[in-house]
Amino acid sequence: MFDNKSDGIVSCEVVNKSIIGIVIVVVLVLGAGGIYLATQKSSTPVEDTQSNLKNISPPPTFSTDTSSGGTFKQEDFQNIKSAHYVSSEPANNVLLSTSPSKVTLNFNFNLTAPSKIQVTKDGSDVTAGTTQISEDKLSMSVPINANQTGNYKVAYTACWPDGSCHNGSFGFSVKLP
Amino acid sequence: MNNSSLKILIPAAVVTVLIILGFIFFQQARLPAPERSDGGQVKSAHFVDSTPLHGETYVAQPVNTTINFNFDLQEGSKISVTSADGKEWTEGDALIEDQKTALKKNLKQDMPDGGYRVSYTACWPDGSCHEGQFSFKIDSTKKSEYQDLRGKKELTIKMKEVKFDQNKIIISPGTEVTWVNEDNFGHFVNTETHPEHTYYPEQNSRELTKGKTYSVTFQTPGQYNYHCSAHVPEGMVASLIVSN
């Protein structure tokens, strides 16, 4: 194979060719890597959207304990509406200076049992009776014991004629003089 | 080049080409194309449900796309509906209805059979926006299951034995449809979805006791699915198509 050249030159040539070969392989592998990364990148919008979904939980709300005379801070409630929600009394995020005796929710479709309202203050149940559905089936209300300054969270389940139910929640605050 | 360099270069080139083909193959196999009309559902924050539902097949086109949420939508919220060729099918402004919980956009007429991708952006009171996607199909071949009652000015559908007696019909634009309850207990006529009833709110009755009637005149061509809100679990659902 290696005819009339000296041994030194031949081995030098072989080494050069091997180096060129290795360089070509490295360049091609890097090229393949580049293609891989390019296709990978084009797929990221969907993955981004999905990872964003993990961060959608409502912003944390906080309630300040006022039972021991601490300063009252009004909580900002989200008005999460069930199907057919129309309005509420008290309304979401109102600040009252007197204690409401009940919470009423109005809808634009027929409520059925077991629709229910639960009102809590600092995690303790303050409902003072059972939820009643109005004669026209478009509203329900529950008596409450809200005679303390604080933030009141209202969670409700609204049920429809076929027995399916949906949840909603909101809140209001009371600051007694 | 002499033989010795070829001995190195040929196997190296073959291996490299195989590596590249391997990468491309696995990329194609592993990644779903995000814009395809049979793609998956991505739900934004506060999403509840939609008309059409994700994966639902319509026999005739819907007149709009309506998406229900459980929170107050704000200006800036939007919907896009595209066919596989990328054509946009919504028209007009994005509408916010039903105590700000329903996002709606009307659809152009003459949507062809095929898959459609719905992309939406829902914006909230704090100014943040979230995106979501879902898909539906139109397949007019199943229109043969529908009774063709076109050309009538008026039509009566009985609600009897927990059924709509004509539950798949085709009517002409301008037909007044009257539902009458012949059962001894209450029935309802409510548009999709259950229980939000936001797709075509004009088609929403309160409870109809025995003998009571409810009428709606349909104008815009398209498919209108509806149900009795008291008897969805019993399968008291129906569909009508308005067609020229």
Image (tube, coloured by chain):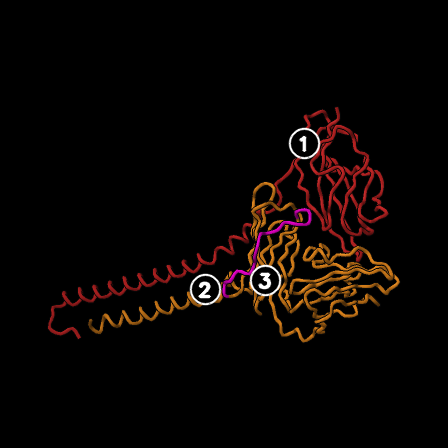
Chain colours: A red, B orange
Query: In front: B132, or B144?
Result: B144
Residue under the image location 17 percent in, 64 percent down: A12
Question: Which portion, as a residue range, is magenta?
Answer: B85-100
| Mark 3: secondary structure | strand
Measured in 3D between alpha carbons, the distance from the residue under mark 1 to the one under mark 3, in whole angstroms, is 42 Å
Please give left or right for residue A73 compared with residue A12 in the image.
right
Q: Does the magenta segment cover residue A148?
A: no
Q: Nearer the viewer, mark 3 or mark 2?
A: 3
Task: Report whether A25 appears left or right of B139.
Answer: left
Whole-Å distance between the Cαs marked 3 and 2? 23 Å
Point out which mark residue A24 bears: none
How far across and down, in percent of the image, does residue B228 sit? 78, 61
User: Against B243, is B201 above or below?
Assistant: above
- For the residue pair A24 and B227, the one nearer the viewer reads as B227
Closer to the camera in the image, B227 or B45: B227
* Marks 2,1: beta carbons within 8 A: no
Name which of mark 3 and mark 2 comes first in the sequence: 2
Residue position for label 3: B135
**Dot 2: element:** helix
Please, is residue B42 above or below residue B221 in the view? Answer: above
Q: Nearer the viewer, residue B96 or B10?
A: B96
Instruction: Give yes or no for residue B90 being in the magenta stretch.
Output: yes
Measured as percent of width and height from the top left, residue B49 is found at 66, 56
How many circles with numbers are drawn on the protein?
3
Mark 2 vs mark 1: give the one in front. Answer: 1
Residue annotated with mark 1: A74
Q: Distance between the Cα atoms at labels 2 and 1?
A: 52 Å
Type of the residue with mark 1: Gln
Query: Which residue lies at the image location 59% right of the left edge and 40% below the top edge?
Result: B126
- Which quadrant of the figure contains the C terminus of chain A? top right
Q: Which residue is mark 2?
A: B27
